[in-house]
Image (tube, rainbow, N blue to C red):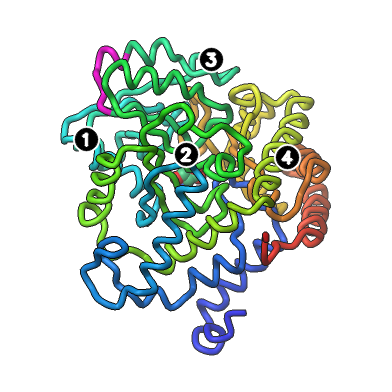
Amino acid sequence: MYEFIKKQDAEVFAALAGEETREQEGLELIPSENYVSSAVREAQGSILTNKYSEGYPGKRYYGGQTYTDVAETLAIERAKKLFGAAYANVQTHSGSNANIAMYMALLQPGDTVLGMDLSHGGHLTHGHPVTYITKFFNFVRYKMKDPETGEIDYEEMRRVALEHKPKIVLAGFSAYSRELNYQKFVDIAREVGAYSVIDIAHIAGLIAGGAVKNPFDYGFDVMTSTTHKTLRGPRGGLILTRESEEIAKKIDKAVFPGLQGGPLMHVIAAKAVAFGEALQPQFKTYAAQVLKNAKAMEVVFRTAGVRMLGGGTSNHLILADVFGSLGITGQEAENVLDSVGITLNKNAIADDTRKPMDPSGIRFGTPAITTRGFSEGECTRVAELMLEAMKHKVDDAKLAAIREEIKVLAKKFPVPDSFV
Ligand code: DSN
């Protein structure tokens, strides 16, 4: 592998080879990461990177689009089928771009969005003050009513909506482990005349695989997403419109020429391949197993008395208050687990009193290890080893033994080349 890079560029080759070993010998528990198939990587590494294709299939600004049109149309049609959408835009380079384009399509400067507070699980692009979009749009927030159950404060959400008259009611999250009450979001949006939008980046694969509910079944107008998390595609974005042609047209215009220039046609071809994989029956089994594996890890943490935000998980991720329960900070936990070959991320917990760079929590999940073929037994063991490592964070001999066990486990479950 990488034979041309190896001959030509020793420095980049060393980085790629190092990452290859890191991924093969360690366990990836960052819940927003996954492994793609070799077919997805072939498409992403293909000659389509050579092509400029501004515009959309059949309506491009440059010539030579016979094959780019085929690739993009396949991606669009497969995305529509996967999610039950009438329209799909597959051009956004990322989930953040998908959200920005969605705001540009549906809002005028100064309009208001009602979204989830970052500290309760929302995403930066849902209106965190550090982001540039907050200079143009006004963001108001909702939170969990009770971090112990994860239930959203829908009454307060409705009150804020009635007071601020948002143009968008935005559901979705990047650090939240329960299912939302979709009907309440849609009802509140309709009551105040807002668009109902959900950012499904984290759970797109679970929706596509039928392991969790599809928000379109509850009447959401638009769904934004990434393609590289549970959906197991290349890094990129996706915007789906349930039924309105008017909204879909606004979204297409906002993506190009509004926000982006030439689409990444190699990535779009890789999206088409990944969506094709997600349409296979095996993907349903995968999505269901992601949830079962997360539950198995939840049981270990609960038995050990570790506080989990939302009281546990109904999806692919767990947010654990390790500082409150084990006296180890999120950063310390991330470091010690990294040293034994387990990659996850520190994460703020609801109303965290600690700083974002060294918060109280860790966030971890099962999409990537499930792709490797882990089932509940392996996941239970990984959760036990995580607790052991955190409890013995200064015991080098113990940590070395855990590192060895992780390496053996990882080697037993190599990252597969193909999922179909
Ligand atoms: N960085 C992603 C995540 O980890 O959830 C969200 O953008």
Label 3, residues with CA under 10 Å away: few <14, some 14-19, many ≥20: some
**Mark 2 = which residue?**
200
How far from the left and from the top, in percent, is residue 58? 28, 65
How far from the left and from the top, in percent, is residue 134? 25, 36
Q: CA separation, marks 3 and 2? A: 22 Å
Q: CA separation, marks 1 and 2? A: 20 Å
Q: Earlier in the sequence, mark 3 or mark 4?
A: 3
* Amino acid type, mark 4: Asn
**Mark 3 = which residue?**
146
Q: Choose mark 3 or mark 1, whichever is in front.
A: 1
Dot 1 and dot 2 residues touching (CB under 8 Å): no
**Mark 4 = which residue?**
293
* Amino acid type, mark 2: Ile
Q: Residue at x 53, y 36 (%)?
A: 347
Give the magenta-colored segment's residue range: 160-167
Q: Secondary structure at mark 4?
A: helix
Label 2, residues with CA under 10 Å away: few <14, some 14-19, many ≥20: many
Which quadrant holds residue 310?
top right
Q: CA separation, marks 2 and 4? A: 20 Å
